[in-house]
Amino acid sequence: MALALLRRRWLKSTPAAAAGLALPLPAGAGAVAREVVDPMGSPLAAADVTVTALDTHRVAVRGTTDPYGYFLAALPPGRYSLLISAEGLRPHRETIETGPGTPAATERVWLQPAEALQLPTPGTWLFDPPHTAIRFIAKHVGMAHVHGRFERFEGGIRIAPDMTDSRVHVRIDASSITTGNSTRDNHLRSADFLDVERFPHIDFTSARFAYRGGSKWTLQGSLTMHGVSRSVALDTTYLGTVNGGYGQELRCAALATAELHREDYTLNWRSMLARGIAVVGPTVQLELDVQAMYRTHDTPTPPE
């Protein structure tokens, strides 16, 4: 409550804030105030701010900058680590100290462009199954979350000289679905859901890589499941390349997410409930945590 009151009063007096805050603070508290701007000096909204106590290493405050790039928080007296970060920019770190009743001078923080991650070498990259996971999260009839994964899959990435022309293909063995409950897993494999005897595979094939800035990409493509194909956009974070693993092979990594709607794939949720088959809710969050190896004449074979 005190923090919210302090923030409202401060936002009503931005010119005064530029010279330093002289606002009422909770008894015995200090404050931290920052104005965050991008490399062009424009206000940076929604930058992530984390303040951590140096003595306990616990997060004292976590939040984001407002639409004008400002962040203000009241803090108990002490020494803190302040971290400010935003997509595509280098994080800013500093140590601050607050004392009881100490007014907060509004200091400006300029975030600078982050060094771009090296893009994967053009060519074919093969998934490394032991270091790749295809997971999903759904709600069990609108209540607890169900976590599951597919244990068998294959695929790879074809990186083009122009990254936007690259392609990804993933083929999943639908029968390898597991949620840690054999009764539920059998329902998921049955004709009531995935119908793995008729539709043994789930396939994703990308059509376009769209760059969104920083390490963010969107992979537009088609997901085929239960005999139905639908357009899907994978929100993807590229994690870079490294030499290592089984030998010193070149590998890259990425994390991709999407939301799927069961009824898009003719999986009739209402019919299943009417027959007492309480499996998962109508939407499913899909996550692909991928490592891929650059294919050469001596690319190692992943262990089973």
Image (cartoon, grey):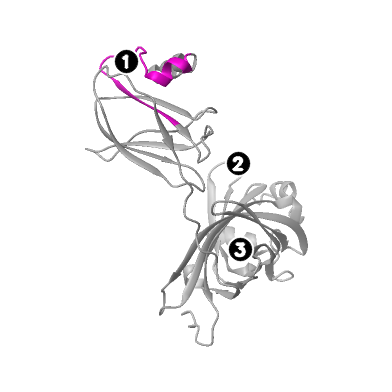
Name the residue nearer the viewer: 298 or 13.
Answer: 13
The local secondary structure at tag 2 comes to: loop
Tell me the residue that label 1 is attached to: 26
Residue 51 in the image: state x and y as whole percent.
35, 35
Examine the rendered structure and indicate whether residue 262 appears above or below residue 102.
below
Instruction: Answer few, some or many: residues within 10 Å of disc 2's Cα (few below 14, many 20 plus, some between 14 and 19).
Output: few
Tell me the residue that label 3 is attached to: 186
Q: Amino acid at mark 1?
A: Pro
Q: Which residues are magenta?
A: 13-35
Examine the rendered structure and indicate whether residue 104 appears above or below residue 115.
above
Decide whether residue 33 is among the magenta residues. Answer: yes
Q: Residue at x 55, y 80 (%)?
A: 295
Q: Amino acid at mark 3?
A: Asn
Residue extending furthest left? 55
Decide whether residue 201 is among the magenta residues. Answer: no
Residue 204 visible in rendering: no
Tag in front: 2 or 1: 1
Tell me the residue that label 2 is attached to: 142
The local secondary structure at tag 3 comes to: helix
Q: Residue at x 41, y 17 (%)?
A: 6
Residue extending furthest front? 40
Residue 24 in the image: state x and y as whole percent.
35, 12
Quadrant location of the N terminus in the rendered image: top left
The local secondary structure at tag 1 comes to: loop
Q: CA distance from mark 2 to mark 1?
A: 41 Å
Among numbered discs 2 and 1, the one appearing first in the sequence: 1
Name the residue nearer the viewer: 18 or 23.
Answer: 18
Q: Residue at x 42, y 21 (%)?
A: 18
Q: Residue at x 74, y 70 (%)?
A: 198
